[in-house]
Structures are given as C-alpha cells and as structure tokens.
Amino acid sequence: LKCGVKWKLAQICNGVLTLASGDPEASIQGLVMLFFSFFRTLVDRNVQVTVELKNDLCITGTLQSADQFLNLKLANVSVNDPDRYPHLLSVKNCFIRGSVVRYVHLPAHEVDTESLQDSCRREAKQVK
C-alpha cells in the first residue's frame, strides 16, 4: 500500500465477521457504527482522504463529516483524473452517498490498525 491504507469494511475486519455466529445483520450494524465512530475521529482531525467511487471516480479532499450511513462530506476537493472528468474541476465541496463508495484511502499515519482491529474483534464478540 504505497500511498496509504485502503479500507473496506470486510477487509479491515478480515476474519472477524466469521467469528460472529449471531444475527449477521446485527453484526454488520455494529461494525458500521464502529466505522462511523472511527470516521468521526478523522473528521475532528481534518484528515485529507481519497474516496474511490464505484464508477471509478477518485476524489481527494478534507473530510468534513460522516454520518451513520457512512455518507461523507468533503471540502477542498480535487479530482484525481481531471482529463477524464473536466466538468468536476470547479467543484470545491461535495457530498458522497455511502452506498456509492468503493474505498476510502487514508494516510497510513492517521490509522492505528491494531486498535481498530481490536475494536472489530470486541464488537464481534459482543454480537455472539
């Protein structure tokens, strides 16, 4: 991972989802809330992130807010491929619906992976 850490819900908790033998919907909901609180800490620190959408558009900006549906608001945005998306060059702020996000690329120094994985494990054990 050259530029940072690639996160995807199932990848970050690799193996943890299989530990939860209870209601899978409750397990997913608990993990979503875990990631919601994690993204809120990133908002407090004004972290710059790159959001890769399912349509292959990559947008870089400062994380301004995140909600329980993992919708994101970015400020000071730029498009990573301006030749392909010239109509987005004038956009400075954007709202991204959580369901269209493929990956959120985070700077490696902003993420305590061990702490996050421990939190995933604890959440999975609570659902059992």
Image (tube, rainbow, N blue to C red):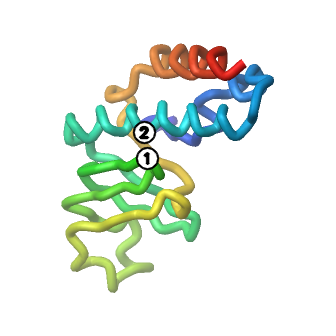
| First along the sequence among labels 1 and 2 | 2
Which corner quadrant of the image does residue 77 belong to? bottom left
What percent of the width, then of the height, locates residue 21?
A: 80, 23
**Residue 79 x %, y %:** 34, 67
Q: Secondary structure at mark 2?
A: helix
Q: Which residue is mark 1?
A: 68
Locate residue 123, reporting x and y percent: 58, 21
Q: Quadrant of residue 16?
A: top right
| Total numbered badges shown on the rendered structure | 2
Q: Return the residue at label 2.
A: 36
- Tell which residue pokes out farthest to the bottom in this image: 87
**Residue at position x 34%, y 83% in the image:** 86
Q: Are marks 1 and 2 in contact (CB under 8 Å)?
A: yes
Residue located at (40% from left, 70% from top): 81
Identify the residue shown where x is 51% and y is 62%.
Answer: 53
- Amino acid type of the residue tagged 1 in the rendering: Gln
Mark 1 vs mark 2, CA separation in Å = 6 Å
Using the image as rendered, state which of residue 28 and residue 96 is in the foreground. 28
Tell me if mark 1 has few (under 14), some (14-19) or many (20+) residues whose alpha carbon lies within 10 angstroms of its own.
some
Mark 2 residue crowding within 10 angstroms, few (<14) / some (14–19) / many (20+): some
As helix, strand or loop, the secondary structure at mark 1 comes to loop
Quadrant containing the C terminus is: top right
State the residue in front, 110 or 84.
110
Question: Which percent across, then down, holds residue 68?
Answer: 43, 47
Tell me which amino acid carries mark 2.
Phe
